[in-house]
Image (cartoon, rainbow, N blue to C red):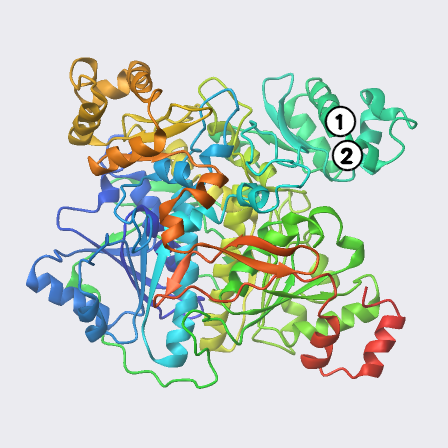
Amino acid sequence: MSQTQPLEGLRVIECAGWNGVLAGRLLAEGGADVVRVVSPAGDPLDREPPFFSGTNISIQSTFYNAAKRVVALDLASEPDRTRFLDLVAGADILIEDWPPPGPDVAAADLANANPALVRVSVTPMGQDGPRADWRVNDLVANALCGSAWVTGDAQSPPISGYGNQSCHTVGLYAAVVALAALRFVRASGRGVHVDLSAHEALVSCTEQVLMQWFFPNGTWRTPIARRQGSLHWSGAYEVYPARDGHGVMVTASLKLTEVLVPWLIECGAAQDLADRERYPDVIAMVKDLPYVMKVLREWVATWDGEELFYEGQRRHQPFGVVWNIQEAVERSPQIPARQYLYTADVSGVGPVQLPGRFFRTSADGPPPPPPARVEVGRIGWTPRPSRQTDAAGPNDAARPLEGVRILDFTHVLAGPFGTRVLADLGAEVIKVSSAKRSGGANSPDHPYYVCWNRNKLSVALDMTVPEARAVARDLALRSDVIIENFSAGVLQRWGLDRDSLAADHPGVTVISMGGMGQSGPWKDFVTYAPTIHALTGLTYLTNPEGTLTDGYGFSLTDHLSGLAAAVAALEGLEHRDRTGQGLAVDLAQYELGLGIMGPAIIDYLANGANPEPRGNRHPFDAWAPHGIYPCAGEDRWIAIAARGDDEWRRLAGMLEIDPGGPFATHVERVANWRELDRAIAERTRVMDPFELAERLQRAGVHAGPVQHAGDLAERDPQLAARDFFGSAVAERWGEYGLDKFPARFDGRRPPRYEGVHQVGQDTFDVLSRVLGYDDERIAELMALGALS
């Protein structure tokens, strides 16, 4: 194994199911030695479908456990507990999902074995609170957090969303907090316990759900975000059917009057949009956005889907054709050009093509191999020696990134969300923007910007002015990490890429969050999250049976890309601290989107499976029932899932359904799913979803109400008990609501939530304090127009 990998030498123990398993994979991708500890009865993931054809080898286990070593220990037996504590003595990080109130191994025993351990407890609801013991799977998690509320069509049941997307969100968060806490431990010599609530993490990643609640007087005119198919909350993105049967995600959000309307006129399809008296400018069109989208819908129907996608991208429009899994893998030239897929020899299967890394760095080793089962005696760890403390490091476990400086060139959601996470954790984030680029959702006068840009300093630089670029370079040379999501090559043209900076600042890490990455035939394509969803199969599969044009109700991959950027930043700091060298990071949001579809992609590549939309049914029929059912009240719903005959019988007893007959076995429940769903819906439709969920949980059944923002803020007892919501103050907005960071460090959340700053509000302070510029130099820069 190369000695240059970002996390080389880091030792991680993973004792976790779905909520923690991706965190271990991410750290292993970075070069950490990750040991997954499972019961002698076997790894639960090994029993998760789908399986490689003709074998009992789980595709899910192969994907999520990549690059890990797996050992079997019985933590209830004294000899194996001792062996486990010996592992702990040599570890840096423990990721576990042991259910409250007590861990599988006592906290005191862990601390005695390793006083400098980072222990990340990632549980469905958090370590305390009235719902701490709730049974939650991906379906129920999405119902509880607000995701399902905004996904699907208003005339149909809410949709959970395809795949284990809740677990991807939580796994990324777990990797962030593990590496952040490690920085505090390295400085203090004292271990940290991180309590990460999956529920809180998911609530923080639902885009408009909380924004509309906190800012109800926006153009949406309602505090409760709507469920409206593929139509984005802004009203400017939607999937429409093309003439060849494909859906195409189109948008009126970018260069509407400069590019899109002239293109419509060119096609003879502009209708009244060509009337300059009715629509004298872009503002008039935006005010009549539903009509604009109607024109687009009718125009899309005259094209073939892929033809429109490619022509749109040629004109720098962020369109995306809705592909199924087979098309997503076979039709994309970007995948082979960037060698995203690789071949590995899976034990018991043979050579298999697998999806690549979630992001790439300049210090990557070979692709992650399949998991390896080993005996505990072959792990080879020795106890970690006591570390020398660093008085200059962070002194507050809840602000573990104090002293780290981030230069933030990002905009919209993905990048700003990632830098918000780092800022919440104590990093000094200097956001660079300009008056020219600060319109609409990129303005502190817009609630969208407010939600993602707290705790940041704002510097105004007009990067078209050479002197502004010189200031930016000075800031870059005094920063630990630079993050940007411009088109490919922009930072290089400004001389701010890692190659341009490394001679003067070898420790800097530069993260580029281009939609398609920094290379390949699609590198100049323009993308937003709905584009990524469409091209990776996520939109196609997040639909009711027989429907192709719904998809996720919010920008899921923007949130996940932001979290991945935070992980990459922390990997860069680890690599610098060990080698003196930062990293160049190529975080292609498209490849992250492919990554979260990993099991489905492998199932296609290995087994030829090309799934169709199935609504809320489990993608691989591991649970039955598995659905969202109507309840009493207007648009009220409950998510219910049962796995195995015992849980089904408990559920059937609570709902007074005959557990036998066509529902007697799992196989029969899967085969008769329509009748099963009807039988459940007949019972639930007269019941209160909150009361029913409580009763089912007490009976040991996975269930949860489908919550909207009002429920989260005013009715969710778990969020209230854990004090999840707070407020901040900003010049433009006064006091406004916010969601706090979804983890506690030794019992404390990150304490600072400073309201959004106006563009350029901190320019003088940063240039004088950080760069040492005097008043005369700053005045000269202002006169040149550089600071605007």
Q: Is residue 456 above or below residue 687?
A: below
Which structural element holds mark 2?
helix
Residue beneath label 1, please? 292
- Residue 522 placement (x, y as % from top left): 64, 43
Which residue is at a point 45% across and 71% down the rendered structure image?
400
**What percent of the width, then of the height, locates residue 327?**
52, 29
Q: Residue 286 got which mark?
A: 2
Q: Does the image show residue 510?
A: yes
Report, in whole angstroms, how far the alpha carbon at label 1 lies from the one at label 2: 8 Å
Q: Is residue 701 left or right of 255 when viewed as pictured?
A: left
Looking at the image, which residue is at 27% across and 31% down?
Answer: 622
Dividing the image into 4 quarters, which one contains the N terminus? bottom left
Q: Residue 303 vs residue 129: left or right?
A: right
For numbered disc 1, what is the local secondary structure? helix
Which of 412/266 is in front? Answer: 412
**Residue 461 falls left or right of residue 600:** right
**Quick check: 172 left or right of 13?**
right
* 538 in relation to 519, above or below: above
Q: In the rendered structure, are the residues bearing label 1 and label 2 in contact, judged by CB atoms less than 8 Å apart?
A: yes
Q: Residue at x 58, y 64 (%)?
A: 754
Please identify the quarter of the rendering in which residue 270 is found.
top right
Taking the spot 78% from the left edge, 84% from the top edge, the residue there is: 774
Q: Can you give x and y, in whole percent of width and height, for residue 725 in the image? A: 47, 53
Q: Nearer the viewer, residue 611 or 784?
A: 784
Residue lying at the far right in this picture: please name it.
Answer: 277
Q: Amino acid at mark 2?
A: Val
